[in-house]
Amino acid sequence: MSEPIVIDGRYCGAPGSANSGYIAGLLAVRIGRPADASFRRPVPVGRELQLDRDGDGAKLFGAGELLVEAKPIDLHVPVPAPPSLAEAHAASGRYLGRRVRLRFARCFGCGIERATGYGLRIFAGPAGRADGLYAAPWLPESTLADEHGWVRPEFVWAALDCSGAFALIGDDAARLLLTARLAVRIEALPRVGEPHVVAAWVIERGAGKHVSGTAVFTAQGKFLALGRALWVEPQVES
């Protein structure tokens, strides 16, 4: 099964390319279960792409070139104790993008220059805990809803993307991390119009490659969704 798809510019990450979490979520919706998405190339916005079902998985192509591949996965990652909503608000006040202008300031997930209702506006900052957790409040708005008032799965994927990078880069605003892989398991969908908490933490640091975990909770601390991301630091020519 193959279908044409055009990514609206609203769903950008880096300028000119799509938000990785959102794209991975679109593929995962076609799979219908927890999935692991691998990114081969940046996904352009505003151009016709081809989304193909491939056995149990899904692939996204642009001009015949493979951009993203998603496969089913059994995802199990230890999840830290959830921060309270008050802790998340306090942590978000320490979001790096409030102090310096970040290169992804208009990202659909974490862009602080996005107006309310046009981006997720998830601004994760350090929660001040011994485990190094980052956290942010998230109030999903109506444009994210399905016909029953729940957040659509692709937007849950987007919510589980960017915060992991901030847990890894800390205060280093010049450091660039790109999503290489993102795996997500959704236990229950968030409810539109209700406050939630997004948490992020470091799983592993390596030489140019790092792994983070992310999770979405209700304001009461109920676990809803889990993410695990592999981030890469692109080499910069001197």
Image: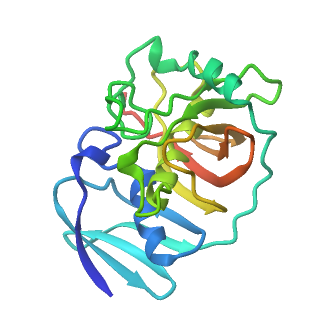
> Can residue 163 be seen?
yes
Q: Nearer the viewer, residue 205 or 32?
A: 32
Residue sitting at x 51%, y 45%: 159
- Residue 85, given in percent of the width and then of the height, sits at 67, 29
Residue 220, image quadrant? top right
Q: Residue at horizontal 45%, vertical 61%?
A: 25
Tag count: 0
Indicate the quadrant containing the N terminus: top left, top right, bottom left or bottom right. bottom left
- On screen, 202 above or below 170? below
Picture coordinates of residue 183, whole percent (x, y): 59, 60
Q: Is residue 69 above or below residue 145?
A: below
Q: Residue at x 40, y 51 (%)?
A: 144
Is 38 on the left-hand or right-hand side of 215? Answer: left
The reply, left or right, for residue 154 in relation to residue 65 is right
In-image side of 184 versus 121 (left or right):
right
Can residue 39 be seen in this snapshot?
no
| Image spot of residue 82 (x, y percent) | 76, 38
Name the residue nearer the viewer: 21 or 168. Answer: 21
Q: Image check: 25 left or right of 128? A: left
Q: Which of 188/199 is in front?
A: 188
**Residue 72 image position (x, y, % from top left):** 58, 75
- Farthest residue to the top: give it: 99
